[in-house]
Amino acid sequence: MLSSGLNSPLLSRSASRITNPKSGNNSSNSSREVSSNSDHSDHDSDDIEHHQDEMRRLEEYINRKLSWNNLSLSEKMSLINKWAIVALVGNLMTTFGCIFYLLEGVFYLATIEIFLGFGCFCTWCSFTRYFENTKDFNLISRTFAVAIPVLLRTLLGIAPTFMGFTFLGMCLFWPFQEKFGSFS
Amino acid sequence: MNGDSVSDVFNGTTTTRFILGQIFTYTWTFVSICFFQNICFVIVEDSYMNVKYSKSYAWLRDEGD
């Protein structure tokens, strides 16, 4: 079992803010306000109960036993070194590409080219990880990492328009087979 | 969207249906270049600016606020 390292002052401060967001960081003030506000109305009591429920859930989250089964998918993914996978795939494809090339009569040249090409591509891309510790050198890769999720979401939003134009073109201009003959 | 194939598409579509071909090609070129392409540029530029001018401890300051 891994011990939870989440009991930081930062989280306890945010927890006190969840308990009573109107108050500052002083927990004694917050408890005083809770006791004084509890007499005002049902709305306030519901609000307090809601925040206490949030506080309880936050405490459960902080004090949970960390194991592989309890982690979310994003937390599991953050524990995996992606560059190692890229390097592994690149080296494996290069190795098998070389072996296939030696056995050229057994395997097709097109298959060998794919293995060698993607192997070289992955190997060269994996060199990027050595720039990760220097801020100025990995500007492009960090920009890439930030921009790609937003770009993918945007492209997903644009996709219906693309599809609309595609089918319109196929319906209207199908005699022009070279460009509008098929969906691709 | 860009490049030499725009001319090929324009010639092909206008040969098939003259008016609709022009409307289709002009609309597609306008929408793709003026909107989609520029939106992608802006997103990448915004990400670049965020990365360039953010500090490595910026997440800590954001959490503390």
Image (tube, rainbow, N blue to C red):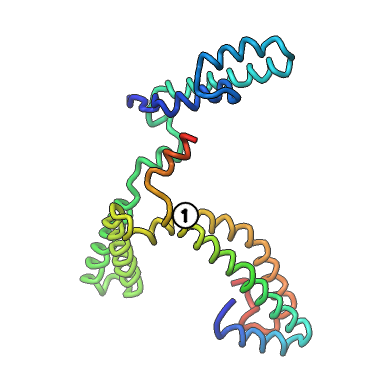
> Is A18 left or right of A2, judged from the image as shown?
right
Q: Residue at x 33, y 59 (%)?
A: A136
Quadrant where the C terminus of chain A is found in the figure:
bottom right
> Is B26 left or right of A128, judged from the image as shown?
right
User: What x and y, as percent, mark residue A21?
Assistant: 58, 25
Q: Which residue is mark 1?
A: B50
Q: Nearer the viewer, residue A61 or A121?
A: A61
Q: Nearer the viewer, residue A45 or A128?
A: A45
Count of marks overlaid on the render: 1
Q: Chain letter of disc 1?
A: B
- State which quadrant residue B48 falls in: bottom left
> Is A74 left or right of A55, judged from the image as shown?
left
Judge whether A110 appears above or below A96 on screen. Answer: below
Element class at badge 1: helix
Q: Residue at x 37, y 46 (%)?
A: B56
User: What x and y, as percent, mark residue A99?
Assistant: 22, 66
Tell me the kind of residue under disc 1. Asn
